[in-house]
Amino acid sequence: MGVAIALVIFIIFTVYKGVRIVPQGEKWIVQRLGKYHSTLEPGLSIIIPYVDDVAYKVTTKDIVLDIPSQEVITRDNVVIIANAVAYINVVHPEDAVYGIEDYEHGIRNLVQTSLRSIVGDMDFDEALSSRDQIKAKLKHAISDDISDWGITLKTVEIQDIKPSPTMQMAMEEQAAAERQRRAMVTRADGQKQSAILEADGRLEASRRDAEAQVVLARGSEESIRLISQAMDGKEMPVVYLLGEQYIKAMNDIAQSNNAKTVVLPADILNTVKGLVGDKFK
């Protein structure tokens, strides 16, 4: 009875070892006596128990590989931080497992190396604004290499590319200095325009004052001429006119901030006559 039970167990275990059900989205690598023998497709498969062995189980679904961030130096010696993501698909599982020790690790290093080389041939501004160009060059650079491993590169995307913290701080300081310079230029232009307008105003006011004085002088001249024609040898109208101007001048002096005491002559008439001279004697 014990032998029969042991035999039944052995048969069940042997059937288990020989019958393989491969799930959809995977391919299994079978080795016979330590050597590659075949690749099992999804579905039911039969192998030779104790001779054949499933050594590797490889997914045929698209694999997303996150490429870690790294420091990259541009052609103009600026340090930037760049990372990427690659989408791959294993087409030939036997090449992927026997062609390289760890294909995921190998692809990550290959993308990082190629990315450093591509960005290193670009200037800082070009690298920040040329993601599509970097993506195209990166895909072309690694597609042929990973095809030898039986892997197809679906696409590769640049997740992030930005200046290093030190460079970013320098850029912020430069931007602040540029904004301050523009503000100073704008302020200086405003002061310049204000000074020009103020000078134009003073010039126009002086011109108008001069014109007003000319008009007043002509008016006074005309008044004296008319009075002289009308006085017919009499001196009182002229004395009156000159006395009026004299009193106005003394009044202006009295209202001046610098004037403290104003002395008026007692005999204004004789004073004015003295100003006129011997003409009316």
Image (cartoon, grey):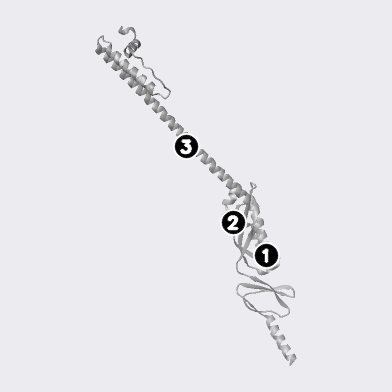
Q: Earlier in the sequence, mark 3 or mark 1?
A: 1
Q: Residue at x 62, y 54 (%)?
A: 81
Mark nearest the camera among 3 and 1 is: 3
Give the quarter of the image for residue 83: bottom right
Q: Earlier in the sequence, mark 2 or mark 3?
A: 2
Q: Amino acid at mark 3?
A: Gly
Q: Amino acid at mark 1?
A: Tyr
Q: Residue at x 53, y 43 (%)?
A: 179
Compared with residue 196, is residue 150 higher up or lower down, i.e. above or below?
A: below
Residue 103's disc number:
1
Q: Residue at x 45, y 34 (%)?
A: 194
Dot 1 falls on a residue whose secondary structure is: helix
Rate crowding at label 1 as few (under 14), some (14 to 19) or many (20 or more) other CA atoms within 10 Å: some
260 or 178: which is nearer to us? 260
Residue 160's disc number:
2
**Residue 176 drawn at (x, y percent):** 56, 45
**Residue 177 drawn at (x, y percent):** 56, 43
State how far apart marks 2 and 3 are (Cα).
43 Å
Compared with residue 158, is residue 224 higher up or lower down, i.e. above or below?
A: above
State how far apart marks 3 and 1 are (Cα).
66 Å
Quadrant in which the N terminus is drawn: bottom right
Q: Amino acid at mark 2?
A: Asp
Dot 2 falls on a residue whose secondary structure is: strand
Query: Circle 3 sits on which residue?
Result: 190
Dot 3 falls on a residue whose secondary structure is: helix
Tell me: 237 left or right of 13.
left
Q: Is residue 164 visible?
A: no
**Residue 56 drawn at (x, y percent):** 68, 72
Compared with residue 163, is residue 200 higher up or lower down, i.e. above or below?
A: above
Give the quarter of the image for residue 150: bottom right
**Residue 86 drawn at (x, y percent):** 61, 61
Residue 56's disc number:
none
